[in-house]
Image (spheres, rainbow, N blue to C red):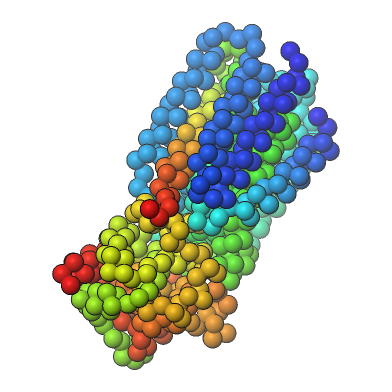
Amino acid sequence: MDFLSLFTIFVLAVFVGFYVVWGVTPALHSPLLAVTNAISSVIIVGGLIAAVASKGLIDLSSTMGLIAVLLASVNIFGGFMVAQRMLAMFKKKK
Amino acid sequence: MDNTIFGFAYLLSAVLFILALKGLSSPVSARQGNIFGMIGMAIAVVTTLLLHGSGLELGNYTNIIIAVIIGGVFGAILALKISMTALPQLVAAFHSLVGLAAVFVAIGAYKNPSAFFDGGIITTGSMIEMSLGLAIGAITFSGSVIAFAKLQGLVSGNPLVFKGQHLINLIIFLAILTLIYMISVDPMNLSKEQYFWAIVGLSFLIGFLIVLPIGGADMPVVVSMLNSYSGWAACGIGFTLQNTALIITGALVGSSGAILSYIMCKGMNRSIVSVLLGGFGGDSDEAAAAASSPKGNVKRGSADDASFIMGNAQKVIIVPGYGMAVSQAQHALREMCDLLKEKGVEVKYAIHPVAGRMPGHMNVLLAEANVPYDEVFELEEINHEFSTADVAFVIGANDVTNPLAKTDPQSPIYGMPILDVEKAATTLFLKRSMASGYAGVDNDLFFRDKTMMLLGDAKQTTEEIVQALNLS
């Protein structure tokens, strides 16, 4: 894809983020941090590409990729689970 | 294989991430949103493996699966074991990992261009995007490590300021930009590899230097800002990989963190620039306690007095602050409020936007103690109600109640929105000592006739009030 298309997507996504996040209730700002942290770990995609590229060989690039996969996994599982744990505590008046 | 279908899959995962954030508009829809987020992540991972991993020996997947399992188990244990008081540290630690992952991906792409770029050629444009992602990732990492160390108490929460700091930061920043320019004009020239590592090193360094001078009380801004950075780092890598899911998600997270930083700054009436320049607000107490001299008569009360006043009130508004988190008083507090409600007292909670060490910190602690979220209100929602309240019960908060913010243009906290606790018939302050808050400003509310001070540990005092309420 050419740069302009990607940049268009980027700018529109910033606007989507802007409006969606202003809609987040302040009470849930901590879970918001945890969820954004978890989804930004989609950077795992980059790690996976590096890790699978070497066709089974362990070289510098694939090792870097595997470390990135490991770090991002900590975040993905940790981020979503801690968000879930927080959200489970928010209850209405009985 | 047709690449269009993979493009759709990445789009789907980005849409699911948007829905995950959208869900957070209400506690009712938030958990479902979180599930959407998890599905989105699973789709992104599977799509990547199908797209890039075709025709592979199973052996290479084993490495990946092992990495995911090790990371996943570790992350899960952290998430389940962490105490809610330590959440800000955990979030800072998680941000550092996103930053570090971005650094490793950039190294991986730089060392093996054929896996990442058409024809194995890194273009100037790709190199700029990649090195920006690399630099922001490295800054996110080292900045978050310092933020973690400060929040965890490994490094003093006091701002660390030295002469010429801003000049040094500026020089390093310009050096990073110069290096990015120099490596990007000729990205495939391997003799320039040293520039790549210099960018990594200098970015780590400036991340440390940016966060060190920022004081403990400004941590909500720092945590939000690093959240934003982690998003922009993902964005930079997303442009490099031409991956829409990464670009969209990075942009969402980047703007989310920026908005949180803005809200936190507004809550303190400070500009993001002044926060970044640092030097404001340490761990408070000690030094300030020694310096402050009594300005009048302080009315000190006992737990019995507090229980009597609140037991006979019609309406009590609770104002929690960081002190409640430190002494873990939220459970005792909820018990106290339950007893008051049994006596027919109306109880509400008022949350200042910057109370605690991360955005929404107080809400989570109260939720942990089973306080229903519809009894918890934001500043704008509840501030007009203090004039009709019999008691404002301030537990571990100080500066966010200081009326000087409204009246004294000389005060460092002038213009900061405050909770109008002085309008309640009686104001009860639970504090460890008479010290001033993080801003180093005396709170003259302490010396007013309508104020009663309950000095001591917040949790212990609250438990004593609970006992007194039980006896009455």
**Does residue B96 appear to the left or right of B188 in the view shown?**
left
- Measured as percent of width and height from the top left, residue A75 is found at 50, 37
- Measured as percent of width and height from the top left, residue B386 is found at 45, 77
Q: Is residue B11 above or below residue B201?
A: above
Q: Is residue B292 above or below residue B188?
A: below
**Does residue B127 appear to the left or right of A25 in the view shown?**
right
Residue extending furthest toward the left: B471
Residue B111: which quarter of the image?
Answer: top right
The residue lying toward the viewer, choosing from A87 and B234, is A87
Residue B165: which quarter of the image?
Answer: bottom right
Q: How many marks?
A: 0
Q: Residue at x 24, y 77 (%)?
A: B308
- Measured as percent of width and height from the top left, residue A14 is found at 71, 47
Quadrant showing the N terminus of chain B:
top right
Q: Residue at x 55, y 40 (%)?
A: B33
**Res. B282 in view:** no
Q: Residue at x 57, y 8 (%)?
A: B57
Q: Is residue B63 above or below residue B448?
A: above
Q: Residue at x 57, y 19 (%)?
A: A59
Quadrant showing the C terminus of chain B:
bottom left
Residue extending furthest toward the bottom: B296
